[in-house]
Amino acid sequence: MYGWVAHCFKNYVVFKGRAGRPEYWWFYLFTGIGNLAIYFGVPRPSSAFAIAQAVWFVISGIPSWAATSRRLHDTGHSFWWAILTMLVIAPVPLAQLLNPGIAKQGGPRLAAAIGVLFLVFTVLALRLLVLLCRRGDAGPNRFGDPAPITPAEANETLQAGQR
């Protein structure tokens, strides 16, 4: 586990190339444990909680997106699948943030629109999950050579690319 997590942090902003299932899912587990530690370890609501969340996002958010991008590349798909999934649901919290009383003002039409957005989001999220769980392409694809199998192999590939 440690090797894959370290590899993801070494590739902090590398959105090209490919990542196998172990690299992605071990890093996902690591970030999930970090999220749980903040959620249960820092008192809410407090400024310390908000600061801890912001710091953790800076530390783990970008490498998570980069690992997701590389994982999707391993299955022959673009990072746009993840971006599209995030963009579909973004209007709901954004509208609530900009106008806290919008749910009361919007009535049934707004409720229907939010319901449709959640349905589309659910379909896209399930599709994204299937892509992230799928076995990667066996040989080279348009995103590069196959993903490394071990953290040591990944680090060798990383060092060879820096020379």
Image (cartoon, helix red, strand yellow):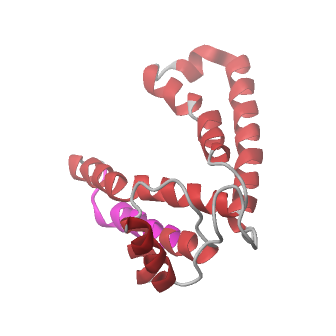
Q: Who is closer to the viewer here, 119 or 5? A: 5
- Residue drawn where x is 36% and y is 52% of the image: 57
- Residue drawn where x is 70% and y is 54% of the image: 128
- Give the answer, above or below, for where 18 lies relative to 92: below
Q: Which residues are magenta?
A: 28-44
The image quadrant that residue 71 belongs to is bottom right
Q: Position of residue 89 (x, y in %)?
A: 62, 36
**Residue 29, magenta (yes or no):** yes
Instruction: Examine the residues drawn in magenta and state their main secondary structure.
Output: helix
- Residue drawn where x is 57% and y is 28% of the image: 91
- Give the answer, above or below, for where 36 lies relative to 113: below
Q: Position of residue 68 (x, y in %)?
A: 57, 58
Pick the quarter of the image with the C terminus: bottom left
Q: Position of residue 27 (x, y in %)?
A: 48, 70
- Residue drawn where x is 76% and y is 39% of the image: 119
**Residue 114, magenta (yes or no):** no
The extreme left residue here reads 48
Q: Residue 38 vs residue 30: left or right?
A: left
Q: Residue 50 vs residue 131: left or right?
A: left
Q: Who is closer to the viewer here, 39 or 45? A: 39
Q: Who is closer to the viewer here, 50 or 24? A: 24
Q: Residue 15 vs residue 118: left or right?
A: left
The extreme top residue here reads 105
Number of numbered markers: 0
